[in-house]
Amino acid sequence: MDIPSIPLGYWIESSLTWLTSEYSLITRAISRVTQTGIGGLNDGLMWLPPWALLAIIALLCWKAASPRLAIGAAAGMALIWNLGLWDPMIETLTLVVIATLVAVVMAIPVGIAAALSQRLYRVIMPILDFMQTMPAFVYLIPAIPFFGIGSVSAIFATVIFSMPPAIRFTTLGIRQVPVELIEAADAYGATRSQKLFKVQLPLSLPTVMAGINQTIMLALSMVVIAAMIGADGLGSEVWRAIQRLRPGDGFEAGIAVVILAMVLDRLTQSFSKARR
Amino acid sequence: MDETRNVKIQVRGVSKVFGKNPKSALKLRDQGLKRPEILEKTGQTLGLSDISFDVYEGELLVIMGLSGSGKSTLIRCLNRLIDTSEGDIVIDDEHIPTLSEKALLECRRRHFSMVFQNFALFPHKTVLQNAQFGLEIRGIAPAERDQKARESLTQVGLDGWEDAYPNQLSGGMQQRVGLARALANDASVLLMDEAFSALDPLIRKDMQQELLQLQSRMQKTTVFITHDLDEALNIGDRIVLLKDGEVVQIGTPEDILTKPADDYVRRFIEGVDRSRILTAESAMRPVRTTARESDGPRTALHRMRENSVDSIYVTDRDRKLLGLLEAEEASRAIEAGADTITDYLTQDFRKVTTDEPLHNLFAMFNDKSFPIAVIDEQQRLLGVVVKGAVLDELARAGE
Ligand SMILES: Nc1ncnc2c1ncn2[C@@H]1O[C@H](COP(=O)(O)OP(=O)(O)O)[C@@H](O)[C@H]1O
Ligand SMILES: [Mg+2]
């Protein structure tokens, strides 16, 4: 019994090769732009003295949420600083911010389109299911031939991995707008875009924000994993600790990730709740 | 009188089938099948069937019917929130069913404001922003928008609430915002789909009164939907009665009450009367003037003139009712040189006791429509009932 195995892997590889050679101009351009963005933001955040950034984040937490969160965030960040993990933390934060920005900018129009067109909805939802069930680091592999080892590949994989919730929640938010309100807008002669911008999007904003929150969390987890393909940051600290069998260092970096995750999560959650 | 009024909207032979193949359903309808059979045979709902009526400029037309009779469907066909399956709707020479997408938007903006049963206010907008919505959609400049919205909020008594959000208001106030949103827009027709049905009875009564006041001030063409006969009688200039997607009767409240088109309408009205147990007493008014049996014809005629009436009830010293003297008869008595009027009285009028059910009174008004005399057991005159009062009373009751 010798059933030949289907050369699925071969097909994917050859089409990737084709894509990389065919579109190298584009990928190189993307790579350059992304690299510049990462560099700029990273330098900016690094240029700020730690205490200044710490104060800004604490103030943000105070205004958007509660004094309690502000104190917690400040204490957490101070701990990271104290552990000597400030620079890797900034590197991770930079990757998360940029990946999230790109993901959200791409996800929201797609989410809107899927909400407004039933046909698109039926195409997109299974794709999102597929994207979300795929093990995270599989995305790292195709990123490399396109963008090589390093931060750009990490961003690429992170964007793809973290985009689904932003799309899903945008679609959900728009579809949840009560039909009476759509009818009211129609009755007063609203065009499609008036309906979208004056009624559907504002009303779906809390849901969209919840999606963005999830996207940020996924981005953070992916950025840490992306240390495997050479992304800087807390992930590479963990990675190095594993390779050198130093569990203490690994845990320290791990705790820094947890603190960063909590601050980002609470902060974005309070943004979505602040909207009525 | 009606012929001289301008027609604002013409509805002609409008039908609506909810389903994929309206033609087949309408064919069955033409063969005489009704809604349930059509639903069974084709799985499609005949929402409206061959509806025709006019809406006059400046009138308040009520569309009334039980739940499921097609009222909401009909009002949504007017501004084409729902597409008709056949028939035509014309507003100021525009044929709504055939308008292009763009012309339809323009038509909705210019002609239609709408008030909804569940208010349909935008929760993310303040009261003022809600009131501005129609104007915002039409691209009116912010300053003018603001001013018009504030004016209409004042009209509905919401001064000082501009910056509140809808969820901070009671139901009645929310619907005032809905009304302000419609008025600010200054469209030529106001559509109200069960606008007051979700409100408490007392607040509902207030809103009806306010609508009537607004209506008498602004003369805005209004199509008002309700499932409640009291409301229809109270506010409607005319009523279109729907049943299972068909028109059963069109007429003034009085027409509907006095000349019900069929048993269905009759049952509707009887239900109203019984539920209230209204009697002649409730609609009775004091007699403005009476004559005594001892009065001469000149005195009696003088009293009639003074009170601008053309007939007068005549009683004896104990206010016992003797008869009715018409102005013509009084003149004849004067010509004949008669001293008293007792020979010139007529008994051709109706008298009832105080406990006579109100709905029986309608049939009693004859062509001359003398007021109906209300008497007690001793035949003493207690008061009169005029035709208008019966309507008022029927409409007012039901709180
Ligand atoms: N979108 C729809 N699809 C199918 N049937 C509908 C739809 N809308 C209304 N109907 C049916 O049409 C009939 C009239 O409904 P409607 O106009 O809402 O009545 P009303 O407002 O008088 O209560 C009802 O039998 C209802 O079930
Ligand atoms: Mg309805």
Image (spheres, rainbow, N blue to C red):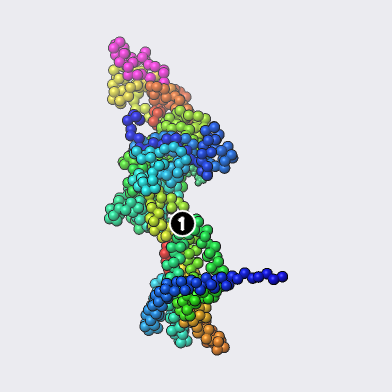
From the viewer's perspective, tell me whether residue A149 is left or right of residue B306. Answer: right
Q: Is residue A16 above or below residue B388?
A: below
Q: Is residue B341 above or below residue B87?
A: above
Q: Secondary structure at mark 1?
A: helix
Looking at the picture, how far across and down is residue B269, in whole percent?
49, 33
Front residue of B122 and B18: B18
Location of residue A59 by image quarter: bottom left
Q: Is residue A204 magenta?
A: no
Could you tell me how many numbered marks the image carries?
Answer: 1
- Identify the amino acid type marked 1: Leu
* Callout 1 crowding tier (Cα within 10 Å): few <14, some 14–19, many ≥20: some
What's drawn in magenta, residue-wise?
A: B324-349
Location of residue B220 by image quarter: top left
Dot 1 corresponds to which residue? Answer: A116
Residue at 47%, 29% in the rendered image? B260
Looking at the picture, how far across and down is residue B79, in whole percent?
40, 44
Looking at the picture, how far across and down is residue B168, in whole percent?
41, 57
Location of residue B74 by image quarter: top left
Residue at 50%, 80% in the rendered image? A229
Residue at 72%, 70% in the rendered image? A1
From the viewer's perspective, tell me whether residue A139 is left or right of residue B80. Answer: right
Front residue of A11 and B299: A11
Front residue of A139 and B191: A139
| Image quarter of the C terminus of chain A | bottom left
